Amino acid sequence: MTIIAKGGSFLLGRTDPQTLFTPEDFTLEHKMIFRTAAGFVKDNVLAQMDDLELKTEGLNRKLLQGAGELGLNGSEIPEEYGGTEMDKISTTIIAECMGWSGSFAMTQGGQTGIGSMPIVMFGTPKQKAKYLPGIGSGEIVGAYALTEPGAGSDALGAKTRADLSPDGKYYILNGTKQFITNSGFADIFIVYAKVDGDKFTAFIVDADSEGLSTGPEEHKMGIKGSSTRQVIFEDVKVPVENMLYKIGKGHVVAFNILNLGRYKLSANSLGGSKFALELAATYANERKQFGNPLASFGMIQEKLAEMAIKTYVTESMVYRTGGLLDEMMHSLDTSGPDGGQVAAKGVEEYAIECSMNKIFATEALDYCVDEGVQIHGGYGFSAEYTIERLYRDSRIYRIFEGTNEINRTIIPSTLLKRAAKEELPLQETIDALKTKITSGSIARDGEEGLVQAAKDIFLLTLDASQQKYGKDLAKQQEIVGRLADLSMQAYAMDSAWLRAQKAVVNEGEAKAKLKLSMAMAYINSTIGLSEYTAKETLTALAEGEELTNLLENLKKLTQYTLRNTVALRQEVAAVISENGKYTA
């Protein structure tokens, strides 16, 4: 029997590398889905990118229908409702490939994720039968209306109202939603409103409802090919049968869907990072300066290597998390009428990992597109080169699906809540670490030791933070943000190293050499950052003798010898330059 890992448990012990899902574990079916999705993006989306950016009327809908014909829209939809009902690795692959497609990734993501998953997971059989077949085919376009002009990250602060009509047949909606993807051509909206002004509730609203209108298209920095507008509700009548789930339980729908949305956005970001690296590597190989290719210069090599390393770590995290989600789904009985809600609860188990993926992947993407522009030099600033669009498009990713700041607050708070419920033995692990510390310095043997050091650094700092602030810790956002970064760095290091170790066992050290080099470079470069972040945090938590003791304990956790990361990056850069694209 497979033991399902608890969300956040990676911090509390060692994971067997063989239990990790990695891209090297793709089945033939997974590879076929990758070819299909990547081919669709290249042949249909990228080939029409200029027209898409100009918002050519009908093009987004046509592309959605094309994706639907290939089964790419219905990957999360049950077969009984016209979907292809794929596993989580397959849906991750599709999201990664869509990450190459610029603004269409937002259009298709709005269709297959937040615009339809509320119905998949929380809809009634009638609601599913009415809407899901059309969403899967692309004949019905979905949109997700949560954000409001005065309530962005504070979703529960929404002002849109829903009042039951005197005859009890309708809810009457009034309010305005802001920044709604697909709103210019959507057929349905998943709308959140407060019944009687206080019960946050989800509804399915048909776009042709009387009183529903949209504002003009937003003039955006990037993702120009996607439709983004205000959606305005003026006495819009919504049949009572179009309420989703339960009155006052809209937050359950919204937050569970956002967990999945964050994860898929990390896969989109992974695809974008690979695209940026390919553009940069190709340009660096072709462009000559001082009689030599750019790719021959050390600083350019270092940029290409670091782009590849961050992409490798992202890929390792994303597919590790996909594997966890897949195992969870396979362990659940979702055959009953509440099967969607059971699945949503399963996804919620990995809310911590979903937030970590979202933050890391989107920030890695920003790094990759930024360095991609730098490698292109002045041409990178020209709209004639694709990297310019990638640079603009990437910026929204750190804001979508809950800002990275909001996601940083989620990580420690969720971990502490689960520990308080005794779902994770957090305090026991901290107590065991304290016992180790009192015994003297802890030797760190190689990268595995450094990965454990990263986990221990987080636990030490978390304990000191709790000792200082207790239940008020959540109010100390500067501390919470640093705790999130420490835990995320540990997950990133752990995922990169475990993947490399699994490859060594399964493929041999020679074939795994590139993975080892990228993992070692990342780990050795990041452990010092973790140590500094902890020092900075501890200095904000204590002073005098207490601070001295904390810093001494930290020093005991960080006795290690660094590798030559410059040489490791040179190895990575040589492979990337030779292949002209991301390689692992």
Image (cartoon, rainbow, N blue to C red):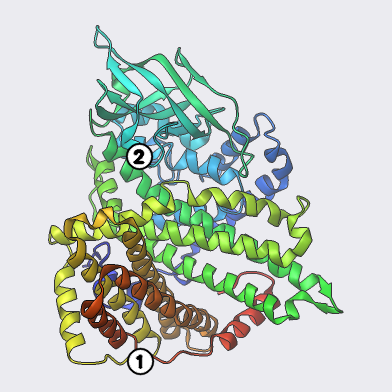
Give the amino acid type for the residue marked by disc 2 in the picture.
Answer: Asp
Q: How many marks?
A: 2
**From the viewer's perspective, is 25 left or right of 468?**
right
- Whether residue 29 appears in this view of the structure is no
Q: CA distance from mark 2 to mark 1?
A: 45 Å
**Can you name the residue that lies furthest to the front here?**
544
Quadrant of residue 420 within the rendered picture: bottom left
**SS under mark 1:** loop
**339, above or below 366, in the image:** above
**SS under mark 2:** loop
Q: Which residue is mark 1?
A: 445
What residue is at 59 percent from the left and 32 percent from the top? 218
Q: Quick one: label 2, few (<14), some, or many (20+) residues within 10 Å?
A: few
Q: Which residue is mark 2?
A: 154
Quadrant of residue 82 within the rendered picture: top left
Q: Position of residue 395 (x, y in %)?
A: 56, 51
Give the amino acid type for the residue marked by disc 1 in the picture.
Answer: Asp
Residue nearest the observer in this picture, 75 or 175: 175
**From the viewer's perspective, is 269 left or right of 55?**
left
Mark nearest the camera among 2 and 1 is 2
| Picture quarter with the C terminus | bottom right
